[in-house]
Amino acid sequence: MAKSGRIAAVLVALAAVVAVAAGVVVYLVAYPPTASASPVGSASAEVTMQTVPAYNQDPEPTWVSYMIKQGDSWVHTTMFQVPAHSLVHFTVYQFDTGSPLRNPFMNQTANLVGGAENVNGKDVSLIDANVGDGVGHSFAIPALGVSAIFPGVSGDSTNQCDVAAPCPMTFDHNTITFTIQTGDPGSYAWQCFVPCALGYPIGFGGPMSTLGYMNGFMEVVA
């Protein structure tokens, strides 16, 4: 092959690599849509979420994921907007199974209004992940010291959600409610700290590190 031909071949291959890399970068940094909390009075709002054992849709059908309700629809996003200096009431429908935690510190709530969350009608501030059904997921905002924990659905359940997200309420799930107090406007990162990314090193790759699945941002606005 002539020198010019070899150069052209190299440039074509390089262009292909650059295109793939650019696609990966866009995929990793592109923000999912932002949902808005539902206002409740003048100084409070509501956010409704669900956690699913598998998204069951492209581009990552096997990944665990959060979804957020916007109006009457469920949106595949982990980005939501809430008012500053307000009480924000969360309702989470937890459809995934659970497991023990590598770090027992993550089995307790923190900085929730009232000091506890409510799980299926019972106030709790600590869940022993080594007994029962373990912990499925969590919701933590490190900058605010906030942490809520979501116990898992029984692994023996014969009615586990196995359809494309969102999961209908007819499948087994736990209902968790809690309230946080917001402060000044800003962008606050939140994360699930339960290592639930099967097939990734120590369980913290894939969905755990991708916006729209197991982490996102709470935008606090004036």
Image: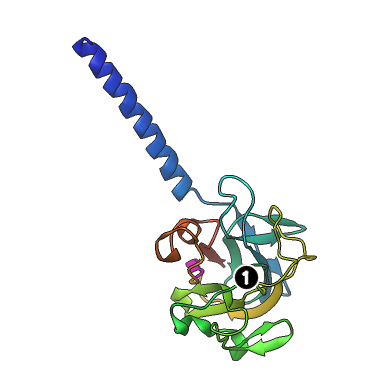
Q: Relative to 77, does residue 9 appear above or below in the rendering?
A: above
Residue 19 occupies quadrant:
top left
* Left or right of 217 on screen, residue 72: right
Q: Which residues are magenta?
A: 187-192
Residue 24: where, in percent of width, then height? 43, 42
Quickly name the residue at label 1. 97
Residue at the farthest right position: 170
Q: Relative to 127, does residue 68 appear above or below in the rendering?
A: above
Task: Please state which of residues 212 and 79 is positioned toward the viewer in this rendering.
Answer: 212
Classed neighbour count for the residue bearing mark 1: other residues with Cα under 10 Å, few (<14), some (14–19), many (≥20): many
Residue 71: where, in percent of width, then height? 75, 59
Residue 46 falls within the magenta-colored stretch: no
Point 74% across, 67% down: residue: 158
Task: Examine the rendering and report whether any part of residue 86 can be seen.
Answer: no
Task: Please state which of residues 55 and 89 is positioned toward the viewer in this rendering.
Answer: 55
Residue 105 occupies quadrant:
bottom left
Task: Please state which of residues 54 and 159 is positioned toward the viewer in this rendering.
Answer: 159
* SS state under label 1: loop
Task: Examine the rendering and report whether any part of residue 115 can be seen.
Answer: yes
Residue 153: where, in percent of width, then height? 67, 73
Residue 173: where, in percent of width, then height? 71, 71
Q: Relative to 72, does residue 106 appear above or below in the rendering?
A: below
The type of colouring in the image is: rainbow
Q: Main secondary structure of the magenta part?
A: strand
Point 63% across, 48% down: residue: 57
Point 26% across, 12% down: residue: 5
**Quadrant placement of the N terminus:** top left
Residue at the farthest top position: 2
The kind of residue on which mark 1 rests is Thr
